[in-house]
Amino acid sequence: MINKSGVIIVNKPSGITTNGVIQKVKRSLGIKKVGHAGTLDPLATGVVICLVNNGTKVSDYLLNADKAYIVTMKLFVATDTYDSDGKILHTQVPFEISQSQIEAVVAKYDGLNYDQTPPIYSAIKVQGKKLYEYALDNREVEIQKRNITIQSLKLLGYDQIKQEITLEVKCSKGTYVRSLVVDFANDLQTIAHVTALQRTKSGSFTIDAAINMHDISEKDIIDLHTVLQNEQHSIVKTDNLKDVMLGKKIVLNTSDNLVFIEDEHHNILACYERDQNNVFKCRRGGLNN
């Protein structure tokens, strides 16, 4: 049994769910506690942050990270899932779309903050039920828009023969690239769906550092100290380690409102948040158990 805690950056292949990746990590390493910091659709490939042992306790601090993707969209065909795994709902007779028209829409979304409607085939919960469950039951449900930011959008390619556009997307958490593709096509007065999607970055973790799902081993576990440092979370030491271990309030001289406490060996012990003035209370303990 491996007791080491941290994260493994896995390069997810297409055709498998994120849960399938988690189960593979569990079997490969013989670890029962494995989670993730953000799912990918079965069609999608790329960066999945797998949380190992006590790494599962810091998921909230990794989920908010910005993401980057490379996406290919097929014009003139709409599906119910907004990707090629779904059922075709509509097709259009192809018409000519110029490179300059596409570049104008790219310019519109580059740096845009807007209220995006998530796909009905998504895991967002409404009244305790996932949206895709409503879709599978053919039940109507009101989908709330989410405020998201497309920090950067670049045109990587336009294949007029295949009627495909490839984009590089850098975006805030909560962004659905499938919805972006539908919105993008709408601005071209047409329809589209995703045919390929690769997550190239999540927070500070890039596809270059991702391990093939079938090749992972214990040496690929990145320790919590390195993970939190890479994500630019505040890590501090204190003389009150006994109080930290007991989850008691402590006094810290720091300007940060949320900090992680470490010991002299860089073991992460707990997460603390400011209570009032310089008094901090325990938000999450037992990170070293």
Image (cartoon, grey):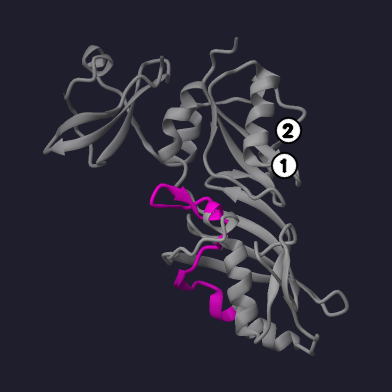
Evaluate if marks 1 and 2 touch, with contact meaning CB atoms under 8 Å apart: yes
Which residues are the magenta region? 107-133
The residue where tag 2 is placed is: 213
Residue 187: x %, y % from top left = 60, 83
**Image quadrant assignment for residue 218:** top right
The verdict on residue 112 being magenta is yes
Say what secondary structure mark 1 lies in. loop
Foreground: disc 1 or disc 2? 1
Residue 56 is tagged as none
* Kind of residue sitting beneath label 2: Met
Query: Label 1 to label 2, Cα distance in Å?
Result: 11 Å
Residue nearest the observer in this picture, 58 or 219: 58
Q: Position of residue 264 (x, y in %)?
A: 37, 16
Is residue 72 something that shows in the picture? Answer: no
> Which numbered disc covers residue 16?
1
Q: Residues within 10 Å of mark 1 (few under 14, many from 20)?
A: some
Residue at x-position 71% and y-position 60%: 86
Q: Residue at x 62, y 72 (%)?
A: 182
Residue 111 on image: x %, y %: 50, 72
Q: Secondary structure at mark 2?
A: loop
| Foreground pick, 203 / 92 | 92
Given residues 145 and 188, the one toward you in this image is: 145
Residue at 50%, 53% in the rendered image: 66
Residue found at the very far right of the displayed protein: 161
